[in-house]
Image (tube, rainbow, N blue to C red):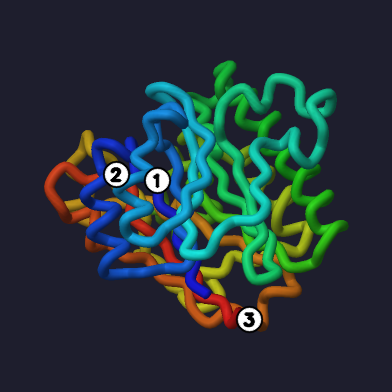
Amino acid sequence: MKIATWNVNSIRSRLEHVTDWLRENPVELLCLQETKVTDDLFPRAELEALGYHCAVSGQKSYNGVALLSQQPLERVDIGFGAILGSETVGDLDAQKRVISTVLNGVRIVNLYVPNGSAIGSEKYDYKLRWLDLLGRYLKTLLETGPEVSVCGDFNIAFEDRDIYKPDGDKAIAKHIMSSPAEREALQTHLFDQGFIDAFRQFTPDKGHYSWWDYRTAAFRGDRGWRIDHHYISPALQAAAIACTIDKTPRGREKPSDHTPVILELDR
């Protein structure tokens, strides 16, 4: 079973990219982030024509997550509240960032983690609160079943080797997406609960990225960040066959600033 994650930065703007990629890479499940469209305007027909079933949670112009599955999805849970209850979640489901399903016995969670804007800002505090709730959400999922796969745009590079030329750059700790508090949140809410970075199971070296900033022509010089991840629970570690980054779509005309990351499980 292949599961891919891709922040498409507007599904309607990148629809041809997605359909072309799926024809060449017919994964069982594609998890999309930043779809930027309300559910009624999501391009279901074009994706269903390729044999994919769509489950979506979107909003106009911002955020939005979706699941594209070759199999019908019998269960889809939208938001933290579907698992934790609305009273626990409060305002943290207002932005459409969480969708999950169960496929071949594996609970698969698709996330679009808040960017945080700038360290110390209100959006940064929101990001840390959101990550804290994510930890509670994942703990609850693990209590209901040991096989959990979490993927998406995390907007966090956990280590310096996940960033182009960070060596000796003291400013990296002051940069959004690599600050100590963000990295500590990943450590506490994922790694300390036993989750494993699937990509790092197979590729320990630096120089592998999934996002390149538009503003600095970063892709041309491969000056990127690895912020799109697959995390698997310990019960799935032995089932992981591969985890790869496909840079090809990022080289297309008018691409998303992210590119797909694919996890393959023996399921």
- Kindly indicate whether the residue at mark 2 contacts the one at mark 1 (C-beta within 8 angstroms): yes
Look at 42% across and 68% down and name the residue there.
27
Who is closer to the viewer here, 163 or 140?
140
Count neighbours of disc 3 (C-alpha within 10 A) and say few if under 14, some if 14 to 19, many if 20 or more: some
Seen as rendered, the residue at the extreme left is 253
Of tags 1 and 2, which is closer to the observer?
A: 1
Relative vertical location of residue 219 with respect to residue 197 in this rendering, above or below: above
Q: Badge 1 is on which residue?
A: 7
Relative vertical location of residue 5 with respect to residue 264 in this rendering, above or below: above
Q: CA distance from mark 1 to mark 2?
A: 8 Å
Seen as rendered, the residue at the extreme top is 122
- Kindly indicate whether the residue at mark 2 contacts the one at mark 3 (C-beta within 8 angstroms): no
Q: Position of residue 237 (x, y in %)?
A: 67, 77
Looking at the rendered structure, the kind of residue marked 3 is: Ala
Q: Quadrant of residue 104?
A: bottom right
Decide if residue 194 is on the left or right side of residue 65: right
Of callouts 1 and 3, the N-terminal one: 1
Look at 73% across and 68% down and name the residue there.
147
Decide if residue 145 is on the left or right side of residue 177: right
The mark found on residue 257 in the picture is: 2
Of callouts 3 and 2, the N-terminal one: 3
Decide if residue 103 is on the left or right side of residue 90: left
Per the image, label 1 sits on a secondary structure element best described as: strand
Who is closer to the viewer here, 90 or 20?
20
Who is closer to the viewer here, 6 or 205?
6
The mark found on residue 239 in the picture is: 3
